[in-house]
Amino acid sequence: MTAPTEPFRVAVFADFVCPYSYLAVDQIDRLAREYNVKPLWRPHWLHPDTPPEGCARDASPEAAAKAERRNAWMKEMAPELYDRIRFPEKRQYSFHAFEALEFASDFDLDFAYKTALYELMWTEERDIGDIDTLVEAGGRIGLDKHEMKTALQEHEYAERALHAVEQAHRIGITSTPTIFLGRTRINGWHYYEVLQSVMEKQGMHPQVALAS
């Protein structure tokens, strides 16, 4: 079969505060390795009404029941990741993280950055609304921490981040994660085997070396 002449497009629209998006990180990182593709991670702002300092979570019985169902689902679907997750005590502010993602993009490190930041939030209980958390994630992947902190404090990437958020609205993103694999759009989290099937139906095959 002839290899595709154009780079195979993989794009993920997600919010750092979405636990389902966190589950997708390992899958998309694996997809990048196995299929030699370069995924694009883009923002879909789930809670634009959240203030920069964050806010308390809904403490109603209905919200508690919904969280219990979510946790049970996540534990069943991805037990190895669920055991590592530490759910934040408050709803965190996402927009500064989108600005940080744009900063990392200028150094071609946005894909690595998103993994570092998800880990900080979901396994180390750090607040992504805090610039120091965003800068720490950047330092872990080799970004200049001083340069990044200055850029975030001065909101040098706010306009770009807002444009990215608006793009998600324009193309009708409503769920996180939303994954584009070539011509196929996948709403929500699915098993890795589903992603593999979609890739192979479009002529993409793992690029891993065969054992000798």
Image (cartoon, rainbow, N blue to C red):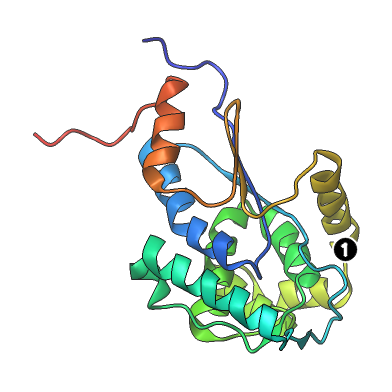
Question: Picture coordinates of residue 73 (x, y %)?
Answer: 46, 65
> Across the whole image, how many numbered discs are drawn on residues?
1
Residue 143's x, y, as percent? 61, 68
Which residue is painted at 71% across and 89% down in the image? 59
Looking at the rendered structure, the kind of residue marked 1 is: Ala
Q: Nearer the viewer, residue 148 or 3?
A: 3
Residue positioned 49% across, 74% down in the render: 71
Lateral position of residue 60 relative to residue 190, left or right? right
Residue drawn at point x = 80 percent, y = 41 percent: 172
Instruction: Describe the element under mark 1 as helix, strand or loop.
Output: helix
Q: Nearer the viewer, residue 9 or 21?
A: 21
Q: Is residue 58 above or below residue 208?
A: below
Horizontal relation, residue 158 to residue 8: left or right? right
How busy is the neighbourhood of tag 1: few (under 14 within 10 Å), some, or many (20 plus)? some
In which quadrant of the rendered image does the N terminus lie?
top left
Res 210 → quadrant: top left
Residue furthest to the left in view is 212
Vertical placement of residue 108 versus 46, above or below:
above
**Where residue 183 sits in the image (x, y, percent)?**
60, 25
x and y, in percent, of residue 88 in the image: 61, 84
Residue furthest toward the top? 2
The residue at the point 45 percent across, 44 percent down is 32
Eyeballing the image, is 60 above or below 142? below
Q: Which residue is mark 1?
A: 158
Q: Left of 205 or right of it: where is 71?
A: right
Q: Quadrant of residue 176?
A: bottom right
* Of the pair 199 and 103, the residue shown nearer to us: 199
Q: Quadrant of the C terminus?
A: top left
Residue placed most toward the observer, 158 or 145: 158
